[in-house]
Amino acid sequence: MSKRRTTSCRKAVATAAVAVPLTFAVAAGAFAAPPDGAGDGRSAHAAAGAQGHTEVEGRLKPILERGKLEFRDLNANGKIDVYEDWRRPTAQRVEDLLARMNVDEKTAMMLISTFNADRSKAEVTDGGQRHFIVRDDPEPGDLATRNNEFQELGEASRLGIPVVMTSNPRNHVNLNRTFGHAEAGGQLSTWPNELGLAAARDPEMVEDFAETAANEWRAAGMHKLYGYMADLLTEPRWTRTDGTFGEDPEVVSDYISAIITGFQGEELSESSVAQTTKHFAGGGPRVEGTDPHHEWGSTNEYPTEGSLYDYHLPPFEAAVEAGTSSIMPYYAKPVNEPSADQLPEHLWYSADQQFEEVAFAYNEPMLQGLLRDELGFEGYVNSDTGIISDRIWGVEDLTEPERYAKAIDAGTNLFSGGSDPAPLREAVDAGLVTEDGLDESLTYTLTEMFELGLFDDPYVDPEHAQQTGDDPASQAKADEAHRKSVVLLRNDERDGTPTLPVTDSQAEDVQLYLEVFQEDEEESAAATAGLAESIRLADPSITIVDDPAEATHAYLWVIPSLSWGEDDTAGDPPSIVLRKDQDTGIDHERILALQEQVETTILGVNFTNPWLVDEIEPGADAVLATFNTTPDAVVDVIRGRYDPTGQLPFTVPADVEAVDRNASDLPGYAEDFDYAYSDAAGNEWGLDFGLSYQD
């Protein structure tokens, strides 16, 4: 079995102290000209303003004019205070604003809660919160309108602090709606899922995707993204596999760098979408695929010596080098047993324990020692959702105020999922958290807000947002990505002629039968009808038949989802076996019967995990891997309008035994046994495998 070269950051980690924001001793209050050199370190937005103008908009507070220059009077005191002066360096503006905020305002701004229109209005106006996670999927124009409503609420407050709208990725169709995703997707330009982008093997395309998506997000009033996942896929049963860029640390590192550069630019500005790269220190080592959303999946175990540095840290090192604005730790806690040696001695928690066995958001040796001191991270740490009241692995015996204190001491700066700042305020009152400790965290998040231009103009144009989201040029780029993502896994010949592509001369004689296989019969029927309509529109030359007895060809598209044991609350691991009796809903008997009945069958498998397809693969004449791919892209590949170039972003396991034997902290290509599946034609479905019509 071939071994791939691994990327290791063990010998090349940068050592840097925590960056201390530059501050200036400037009196708050009356307008003053910026000091000499004030342009150093300012955003592009402020630099543009210094040339004689800036775009500022106030709807509820006055606009103050100084010659041709305009400034928002956010606290309505008739003066241009330092934090209102877009000519000032960001560090000065942050310091001035912090000096004006009271403790209640500061504790409220340490939380980022899930958006709920009615509740969130009260959280802004009465509670002082400014960070929200948007999980629904309105049209871009509606998002923009709602953003403006909340920006007005922020502007109306005592200090006029704007609102930050955050979301998980929303430019991909999410068929399974697993943890962390936007509810639907498809209102903006719609691309293949992350695995599909990885299959395309094109970092430049991914950076273009990120620039395109950032333009759509900012037009709609979205400012911060919970993503993308730098986690390496090392356990094929993991429920969040489809949010990764696969199992190759080099590919994942290249893609994470491209994503951050595309969304943020070289530095944060009013056109950026700030990135929260997740989940440090890598969520991939999932024992049996279980996830730390559940107590039985709460540990990160590293049974292979050196696996943390060799495989899981390189993508985060790439994220740090690319300047990601923030990093999200995972819920899991690293454990000493059965982990092999991973950390250099100077990072050990104690003389006899390399890991402190608490969740990463509470873990000072991992956040301060490894992330900041060793990797040189200078941004802020944003917790995963609900770490104070739920998923409190390793800190179950602490009270909520004590958990806040431990997490802040460890280096967590923004807390996701909470809507009540009272326990944090209690921690301050009890002396567990100091106001200086709050200021240190808020310096990071306020810096991000200023650099994003939100204090100068947080409002957006709903009509422009809708036009941007509907731009056909953006979708054309996404359509090309869909075509690039398709992987040709098998292409048998008959009488010297390959099954694919179906040429123009052959198309006239093709009678095509279609069927989609999902876990629900009604969903399968609806998807089949939709697929048929899409193919009719994409290629009217092909005749689609409803009866397989009339068909010369069949395209059978299998769209599995993870199956669980009878009681997943008991910790039964997920399964990637496509068996109907495990409630995956894939009717094997039907697939096998159609493969026997129809002369030429093309099997499409939608890989949100590396499914075990050994029962249904051999009977097909050609096999395609899709990744939430559009039917149009599949038609283009089948008809030969696009020569498939996609490559598997992971290794498909040979069988259940291979899955059970896999080391949960190693990618499939690095396993020390014959791990990869070999298909009926003898092709090994390992990382990077993919055929083309030129092969």
Image: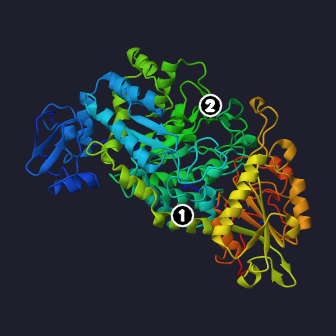
Kind of residue sitting beneath label 2: Glu
Measured along the vertical axis of the image, is residue 267 above or below residue 365?
A: below
Q: Give the label on residue 478, or none.
A: 1
Q: Residues within 10 Å of mark 1 (few under 14, many from 20)?
A: many
Seen from the viewer's position, the closer of residues 683 and 165 is: 165
Residue at 85%, 50% in the rendered image: 656
Residue 269 in the image: state x and y as whole percent: 33, 52
Query: Disc 1 versus disc 2: distance between alpha carbons?
Result: 43 Å
Residue 115, image x, y percentages: 47, 34
Of the two numbered discs 1 and 2 in the rendering, the one whose residue sits closer to the viewer: 1
The image position of residue 600, as x and y in percent, is: 84, 72
Image vertical order of residue 196 relative to residue 420, above or below? below
Q: Element type at marker 1?
A: helix
Q: Is residue 441 left or right of residue 45?
A: right
Depth check: give the residue in front, 440 or 259: 259
Q: Which residue is mark 2?
A: 357
Q: Is residue 28 left or right of residue 517?
A: left
- Most distant residue in the top direction: 430
| For residue 335, above or below residue 504 | above
Q: Is residue 486 visible?
A: no
Per the rendering, the mark at residue 528 is none
For residue 581, what is the image quadrant? top right
* Any part of residue 246 in sight: yes
